[in-house]
């Protein structure tokens, strides 16, 4: 059976051919070097790393490539940014639609007595009214962290207004773009975002174990390194370098993954973010329309312009986990049931603790696959 992957919010199933070819070529060259750590031969690897930064600069409109910091995923990036910017006794604001990649680091800091934490309740469809942020700002508020697009409802939150409110009150602002990078156009240099966390394996269509964050240089001076170690620079000192990107990049980088990620980002740039979004919006609209004739409850915003290609449903006729199993075993359709590492979000939309069944689409998803999934749901539930 040929499987149909409708779980792109977890990991993009299909990668651009050039990304696969780039990684195979790198492996066939029998490279085992590391930028800055292997003599003259490693200089070529350093160039590859710089080229990857430059591709990401084009995607996110970043003028200074050193502001691109490579990590293994958005979770690592968020942990580094959050822990690097908080200070003892400060107050942090987040939203009720956050993934555990944000919620758990903040809760741990709260439990340790390092921070005070406020969670802004979002609307039942997963959207956020930015003006409500003002009600939670206190004298000791230092940081706001929020998601750009929900991995549960697909709701795209208005980070532009939220970040401007944060700046008006002197707060640092971190954006979790794990679900939106590659789907939504983000102009980093012309935004009020201080740190943008991204992962490579979702809408950026890259390999797993890749990702990073973008940080404005003036904010980097305020942010303490969360991970320290070998950088290949100023090695005679026991203190971490204070310049970018070395300040936040310790240890041997995942060059294979970075090369694959660059090729995937180049594919997105060549294709066009607008074209990718239009295709995925068309798929999402068709899927939502087809669900109207099936006995399910649909969660998320009605406005497709603020709806990422993520759709969560539930049904009185069958438990979500059972429905997911039937879709997989009888139809070969891969979905994701449960809480999706987002218990706060499920409490917000009223689906905790049972969870929902999530469908999510990517650029390589076809309309035929959407129609087949709707047909399968109809046969199972009717």
Image (cartoon, helix red, strand yellow):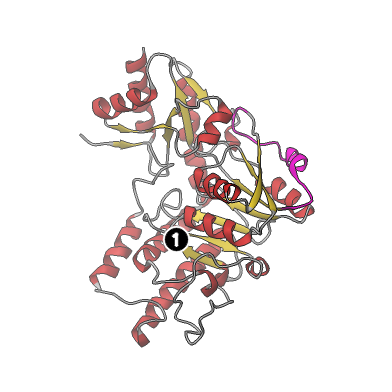
Quadrant of the rendering where the C terminus is positioned: top left
Q: What residue is drawn where x is 53% and y is 39%? A: 308
Is residue 367 part of the magenta span, yes or no? Answer: no
Q: Is residue 188 left or right of residue 232?
A: right
Viewer-side residue, 235 vs 108: 108
Q: Quick check: 262 left or right of 143?
A: left
Quadrant assignment for the N terminus: top left
x then y, percent, for residue 62 = 60, 65
Q: Is residue 31 above or below residue 143?
A: below
In the depicted structure, whether residue 128 falls above or below residue 261: above
Q: Residue at x 50, y 51 (%)?
A: 182
Front residue of 264 and 71:
71
> Which residue, as the protein is rendered here, is positioned at the far left?
1
* 156 or 99, nearer to the observer: 99
Tell me residue 145's x, y (percent).
62, 49
287 or 342: nearer the viewer: 342
Residue that extends furthest to the top in the rendered view of this protein: 382
Residue depicted at 50% across the width and 81% down the height: 238
The magenta segment: 124-141
Residue 295 in which image quadrant: top left
Q: How many marks?
A: 1
Badge 1 is on which residue?
Answer: 266
Q: Is residue 177 above or below residue 295?
A: below
Residue at image x 31%, y 36%?
4
| The stretch drawn in magenta includes residue 136 | yes
């Amino acid at each position: 059976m040929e499987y149909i992957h409708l779980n792109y919010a977890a990991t993009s199933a299909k990668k651009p051919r050039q990304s696969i070819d780039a990684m195979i070529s790198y492996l066939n060259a029998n490279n085992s070097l590391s930028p800055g750590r292997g003599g003259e031969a490693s200089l070529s690897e350093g160039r590859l790393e710089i080229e990857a930064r430059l591709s990401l600069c084009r995607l996110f409109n970043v003028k200074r490539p050193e502001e691109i910091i490579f990590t293994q995923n958005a979770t690592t990036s968020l942990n580094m940014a959050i822990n690097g910017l908080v200070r003892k006794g400060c107050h942090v604001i987040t939203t009720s639609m956050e993934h555990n990649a944000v919620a758990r680091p903040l809760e741990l800091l709260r439990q340790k007595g390092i921070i005070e934490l406020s969670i802004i309740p979002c609307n039942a469809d997963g959207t956020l009214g930015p003006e409500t942020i003002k009600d939670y700002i206190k004298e000791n508020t230092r940081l706001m962290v929020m998601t750009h697009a929900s991995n549960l409802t697909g709701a795209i939150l208005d980070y532009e207004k939220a970040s401007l409110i944060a700046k008006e009150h002197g707060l640092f602002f971190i954006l979790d773009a794990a679900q939106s990078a590659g789907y939504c156009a983000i102009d980093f240099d012309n935004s009020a975002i201080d740190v943008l966390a991204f992962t490579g394996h979702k809408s950026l269509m890259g390999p797993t174990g890749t990702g990073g964050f973008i940080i404005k240089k003036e904010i980097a001076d305020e942010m303490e390194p969360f991970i320290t170690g070998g950088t290949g620079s100023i090695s005679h000192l026991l203190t971490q370098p204070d310049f970018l990107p070395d300040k936040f990049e310790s240890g041997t980088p995942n060059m294979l993954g970075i090369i694959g990620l660059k090729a995937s980002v180049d594919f997105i740039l060549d294709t066009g973010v607008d074209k990718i979004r239009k295709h995925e919006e068309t798929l999402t609209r068709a899927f939502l329309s087809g669900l109207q004739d099936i006995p399910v409850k649909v969660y998320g915003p009605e406005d497709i312009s603020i709806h990422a290609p993520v759709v969560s449903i539930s049904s009185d006729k069958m438990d979500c986990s059972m429905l997911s199993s039937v879709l997989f075993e009888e139809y070969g359709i891969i979905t994701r049931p449960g809480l999706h590492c987002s218990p706060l979000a499920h409490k917000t939309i009223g689906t905790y603790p049972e969870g929902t069944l999530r469908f999510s689409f990517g650029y390589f998803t076809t309309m035929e696959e959407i129609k087949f999934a709707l047909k399968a749901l109809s046969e199972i539930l009717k």
